[in-house]
Image (cartoon, rainbow, N blue to C red):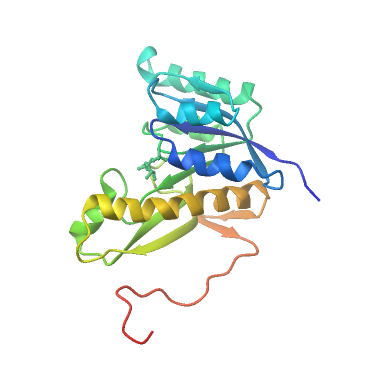
Amino acid sequence: MIGVRRRVGVLISGRGSNLQALLDAAADPAYPAEISVVISNRADAYGLQRARDAGVPATVIAHDAFASRDAFEIAIDAALRAAGCEIVCLAGFMRILTPEFVNRWPNRILNIHPSLLPAFTGLHVQRRAIESGATIAGCTVHVVTPDLDSGPILAQAAVPVLADDDERALTARILEQEHRLYPAALAWLAEGRVRIDGNRALVTGTEASGALLSPRPEGL
Ligand code: GAR
């Protein structure tokens, strides 16, 4: 039986490949969320076209058209509420949200970040992962709290950092996993399977299996 689909607003700033992954997942009527509106702070974001192609309303709310960050965020909040959104997904949205905005959507904003948090918050995280010497990198979907890239972790996917990786190669390997992870994590939140306990997000009905080693020793 198909239950209620939660209405989701997606905030973007650019290419929108994670938005595309969410649109593709939501194209299945059995998926527990639908994308109700896409909002970009940049008029030239390619993700706007992806939204229109999927028949989803796409809106530009340009940060530089507002006198203050508060006014910009009030406009975003109003557009989300006008579209009846219950959940907000940040998908390559490159503006920092104020605590005031975040607190208006408690445990209702998700973000995808291209590192295994809490390692590598902020920018250029794939390059910094390579430079750090780490042999495993990945991506994280987390609940957004007022502290940047620090909210409860819903899901992570790991990939190896290979000896000849440059930033571009590692970014592509991580991005492939982002596109798998984000729709899954949003589905869990939409289904009401996420319980927040302190800074932990506990998801019912999921379990980890086995260990992840990189490089993988011969014979394993
Ligand atoms: C993605 O790699 C996403 O994880 C990252 O921006 C890219 C957006 O790509 N987000 C951040 O770095 C947020 N701190 P997309 O527009 O193709 O989804």
Examine the rendered structure and indicate whether residue 116 appears above or below residue 31: below
On the image, the x and y values in percent for residue 188 come to 62, 52
Q: Left or right: where does residue 72 sit relative to residue 126?
A: right
Quadrant of the rendered image containing residue 129: bottom left
Q: Left or right: where does residue 189 sit relative to residue 177?
A: right
Task: Judge whether residue 113 can be spotted in this image.
Answer: yes
The one of 51 and 209 positioned closer to us in this rendering? 51
Q: Identify which residue is drawn at 45% across, 39% down.
A: 91
Q: Identify which residue is drawn at 42% across, 53% down.
A: 176
Examine the rendered structure and indicate whether residue 38 appears above or below residue 184: above
Quadrant of the displayed image that contains ligand 1:
top left
Q: Left or right: where does residue 125 sit relative to residue 200?
A: left
On the image, the x and y values in percent for residue 83 come to 63, 24
Q: Identify which residue is drawn at 32% across, 73% down.
A: 214
Task: Judge whether residue 144 can be spotted in this image.
Answer: no
Q: Left or right: where does residue 187 sit relative to residue 2?
A: left
Examine the rendered structure and indicate whether residue 13 appears above or below residue 195: above
Q: Identify which residue is drawn at 33% across, 78% down.
A: 216
Q: Quadrant of the C terminus?
A: bottom left
